[in-house]
């Protein structure tokens, strides 16, 4: 969710400029000053799963850069008993560790940057996340709503969810053929060469959270996660959604709630001001640099469901990229295969047969036939047919 934090921070900077013009028209001068504030975000898993800490910097308001990682840091976790574990930078700005931690102890995350700046989190008490009781969907005239139900307890009342969607899609024109430059002929594609069925994925960045103490018996029933509108390509064949649930403390919940409110209602006079966005990471040095972000610790749970097109039929859909895709009317004759197909810009689609002899192929553009331009033809490891 680190990129979500940065997006909201940038939007808040603009909001503050516009709030000062409530009575009179105001044309603010937006500064390009690069504050480069350190942003820290992550969750430390106590049960052996991969823990991930992301370090980055904020960008100037007009910057088109989406992610500005902070590399080369020393990131470590220290227990109240004095034991220490070091994270490894597995991607630029992303630090990971896998291990088991005592649920009864308190921990602090430490960060030492290459420039000598040091940061330390407030003490963290791990929270065990209850299992997801139900992950389901409802189909209505507007589309499909995917929801989650769970039950909290005295230790786990504040919940935060994220999820990943993966779905099958087809190109605008389906082809089983390709031009083989070695034989200078059109041949059937092998399984690993298929371009008529692909998978696409989306890790949803929206902040989704709920306070279970607001409900009887701490029971959250059918909390909406996402609504898939009619005509979405996600349900043309089969959709997978994997939901991760995490129980957090009130400080973490309040932090994400402020970000959510500002993200949903930037510039509203009743929105929490940016000065209220606090975290649990502090500079160790007196008069140290500012830092934004929060790190939590505990266990997380997840659940996956699949939704088939048949489950929501009829499901009309529209894929903008394929709106004008059509088969060429003219036939590419055998003698013209190399000239027409060698570049890969056009793909043979349907054989043209006279009596029993194939004399050529009708074709379509690569953009209309090759689904790998928008996704992958490699089935995800978790995928179930």
Image (cartoon, rainbow, N blue to C red):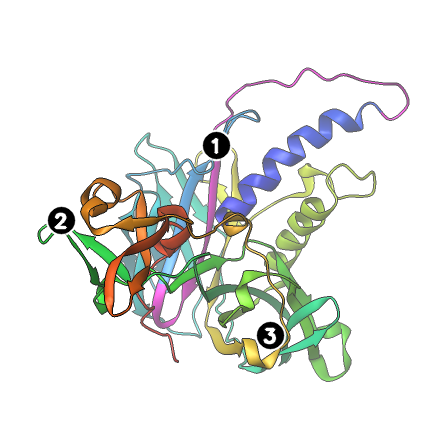
In the image, 319 versus 79, the foreground residue is: 319
Q: Quadrant of the C terminus?
A: bottom left
Select label 2 or label 3 by which is in front: 2
Please tell me whether mark 1 sits on a helix, a strand or a loop.
loop
Q: Which residue is mark 2?
A: 181
The residues tagged by marks 1 and 2 sit, at their Cα atoms, a distance apart of 68 Å
Q: Is residue 137 left or right of residue 173?
A: right
Residue 36 within the segment the image draws in magenta: yes
Q: Residue furthest left?
A: 182
Select label 1 or label 3 by which is in front: 3
In the image, 366 versus 339, the foreground residue is: 339
Q: Earlier in the sequence, mark 1 or mark 2?
A: 2
In the image, 215 versus 207, the foreground residue is: 207
Q: Earlier in the sequence, mark 2 or mark 3?
A: 3
| Labelled pair 1, 3 in contact (Cβ < 8 Å) | no
In the image, 151 versus 361, the foreground residue is: 361
Where's residue 348, x and y in %?
30, 54
Residue 273 within the segment the image draws in magenta: no
Q: Which residue is mark 1?
A: 286
Where's residue 325, x and y in %?
48, 50
| Labelled pair 2, 3 in contact (Cβ < 8 Å) | no
Where's residue 227, x and y in %?
66, 64
Q: Which residue is mark 3?
A: 156
Please tell me whether mark 3 sits on a helix, a strand or a loop.
loop
Q: Is residue 149 left or right of residue 52?
A: right
Position of 144 relative to 233 (above/below): below
Q: Which residues lie in the magenta part?
A: 22-50
Rendered residue at 61%/56% (across/down): 207
Q: Earlier in the sequence, mark 1 or mark 3?
A: 3
Where's residue 121, x and y in %?
47, 50
The residues tagged by marks 1 and 3 sit, at their Cα atoms, a distance apart of 35 Å
């Amino acid at each position: 969710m680190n990129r979500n934090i940065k997006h909201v921070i940038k939007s808040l900077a603009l909001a503050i400029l516009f709030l000062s013009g409530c009575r009179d028209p105001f044309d603010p001068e937006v500064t390009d000053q690069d504050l480069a504030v350190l942003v820290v975000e992550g969750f430390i898993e106590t049960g052996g799963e991969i823990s991930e800490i992301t370090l980055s910097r904020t960008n100037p308001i007009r910057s088109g850069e989406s992610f500005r990682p902070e590399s080369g840091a020393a990131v470590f976790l220290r227990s109240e008993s004095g034991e220490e574990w070091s994270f490894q930078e597995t991607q630029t700005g992303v630090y990971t560790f896998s291990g088991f931690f005592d649920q009864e102890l308190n921990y602090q995350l430490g960060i030492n940057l290459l420039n000598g700046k040091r940061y330390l989190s407030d003490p963290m008490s791990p929270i065990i996340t209850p299992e997801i009781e139900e992950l389901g969907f409802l189909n209505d005239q507007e589309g499909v709503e995917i929801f989650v139900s769970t039950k909290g307890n005295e230790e786990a009342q504040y919940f935060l969810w994220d999820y990943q969607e993966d779905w099958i899609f087809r190109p605008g024109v389906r082809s089983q053929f390709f031009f083989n430059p070695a034989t200078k002929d059109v041949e059937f594609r092998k399984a690993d060469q298929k371009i008529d069925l692909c998978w696409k994925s989306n890790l949803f960045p929206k902040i989704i959270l709920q306070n279970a103490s607001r409900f009887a018996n701490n029971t959250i029933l059918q909390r909406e996660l996402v609504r898939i509108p009619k005509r979405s390509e996600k349900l043309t064949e089969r959709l997978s959604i994997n939901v991760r649930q995490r129980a957090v403390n009130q400080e973490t919940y309040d932090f994400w709630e402020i970000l959510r409110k500002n993200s949903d209602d930037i510039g509203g006079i009743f929105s929490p001001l940016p000065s209220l966005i606090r975290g649990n990471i502090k500079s160790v040095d007196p008069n140290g640099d500012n830092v934004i972000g929060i790190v939590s610790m505990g266990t997380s749970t997840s659940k996956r469901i699949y939704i088939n097109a048949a489950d929501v039929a009829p499901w009309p859909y529209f894929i903008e990229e394929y709106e004008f895709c059509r088969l060429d009317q003219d036939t590419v004759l055998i003698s013209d295969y190399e000239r027409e197909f060698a570049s890969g810009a056009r793909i043979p689609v349907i054989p043209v047969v006279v009596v029993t002899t194939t004399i050529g192929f009708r074709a379509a553009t690569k953009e209309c036939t090759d689904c790998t331009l928008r996704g992958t033809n490699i089935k995800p490891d978790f995928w179930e047919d």
